[in-house]
Amino acid sequence: MKSIEINTPNPYKVLVGGGLIAGTGELAAPLVKGRNAVIVSGSNVFPLYGETVRESLEKAGFSVCCYVYPAGEKSKTADTLIDILNFMAEHQLTRSDAVFALGGGVTGDMAGLAAALYQRGIACIQLPTTLLAAVDSSVGGKTAVNLPAGKNQMGVFSQPRLVICDTDCLNTLPPEVYTEGWAEVVKYAFIHKGPLQQLLLQARPEEQIGEIIAECVKIKRDVVTADEFDQGARQLLNFGHTIGHAIEKCSDFSWYHGMAVAVGMAMMIRACRAKGICDEECLNQAELLLKKFGLPADCEYPAEALLEAAMADKKRSGGTITLVLPETFGVCRLKKTAFNELGELIALGKR
Ligand code: GLY
C-alpha cells in the first residue's frame, strides 16, 4: 500500500493499493469520533462494493445506513443534494459521524458537499472506484453539484478526512469509464515533468496502475498544498478543461468528462503549436499518448458553439478567462485571455 500525505491545514492521507476497501472500517475508525456512517453511492457501484464497505464499517463498530441514487451526471443536482441531507437528518447523524463517498466523481463531489454542509461540516471519507476519481476528484477538496447554468456551480472547498483508493475496483469499470480516467492521468504528464511521464511512455502502463495513481496524487498534492483555493497554480489542473467543459455542455452532458478533456487538451495543443506557443514534442507526445490510451482528439461541435458554451463556464471573470497554455511536454503556463483570443484558439484547434 502506498500512502501519500496531503498537507493542507487539515492534513489527510491518500492510501493506494489492492483490496483496501475491505479494510475501510479499520482505516477510518481512528479518524471518526462518532459511530454512525452513511454510505453514499450510485446505483451502478453500490451493488458491486456496497456490502463490502458496509460489513467492514459494521465490523469496526459503525452503525451504517446507505443512500443510493440513480447513477450518472444527471443526478448531480441540488435536489439530490437536499435529499442526501434529509436522509442524513432522518438517520440522526451527528456532527461527529461520517459520510463515505463510494464511487466516481459524481458521488465524490456530491457526497463531499453533503458532508461539508451537514450541521456545518462532518467527516468525509472518499472511496474512489474510478480511475478519474482516484487521480483527481477524490483528492483536493473540491465538492459540488451542477446547476442548470453549468457544471459544479454550487459547491465548497472541503478536504476529506481520508482517501482510500482500492485499485482492484478499477477491474470492474466499463471500458469507456476506465479509458476516460486516462485523460486526467495524461493531463498530469503535460503539466508536470517527472516519473509519471516515463511510466506512461513504457510499453504496458496499466500494469503499474498503483504507481501511476500515486504519481498523479503526488502532483496534485503539490499543486493543492500550494494553492488550496484555486487562485493560482491549481488552475494548471484545468488543462484541457475549458474546451472540455464546453464539449460536455454542447453534448448535454452525454460526453464523458475525461473524453471531453482529452479533446480539450488536443485542441489546445494544436492551437498553441499553430501559434508557436508550444513545441513539436508537445504535439507529438499528445498524439502518441491520446492514441495509446484510446482517447479522442476531435469533436463534432462547431467552433462557435464551443466558444459560446465556454463563455458560460464558471471560470469566466469579466471579459477574460484563465487558460492553461502548453509550452512543452510537462510544462504549461497560465494566461488571462480575452474571449476573442479563446475563440481564435478554438478555431485553430479544430481540424
Ligand atoms: N479537478 C481540478 C482540481 O481539483 O482543481
Image (cartoon, grey):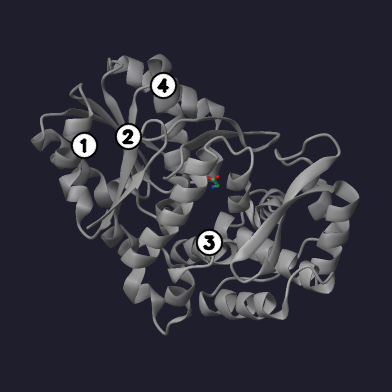
Nearest the camera: 86 or 284?
A: 284
Furthest-bottom residue in this view? 203
233 left or right, relative to 165 = right
Q: Does residue 99 sit above or below 232 in this rendering?
A: above
| Image quarter of residue 258 | bottom right
Q: Residue at x 49, y 63 (%)?
A: 185
Query: Label 1: which residue?
Result: 28
- Sequence order check: which comes first, mark 3 or mark 2? 2
Query: Label 4: which residue?
Result: 85
Residue type highlighted by circle 4: Leu
The quarter of the rendered structure image containing the C terminus is bottom right
Residue type highlighted by circle 2: Arg
- Sequence order check: which comes first, mark 1 or mark 4? 1
Furthest-right residue in this view? 340
> Given contact means CB atoms under 8 Å apart, are the residues at marks 1 and 3 in contact?
no
| Image quarter of residue 317 | top right
SS class, disc 3: helix
> Given contact means CB atoms under 8 Å apart, are the residues at marks 1 and 2 in contact?
yes
Give residue 188's mark. 3
> Given contact means CB atoms under 8 Å apart, are the residues at marks 3 and 4 in contact?
no
Give residue 161's mark. 2
SS class, disc 2: loop
Q: Does residue 343 sit above or below 227 in this rendering?
A: below
SS class, disc 1: helix
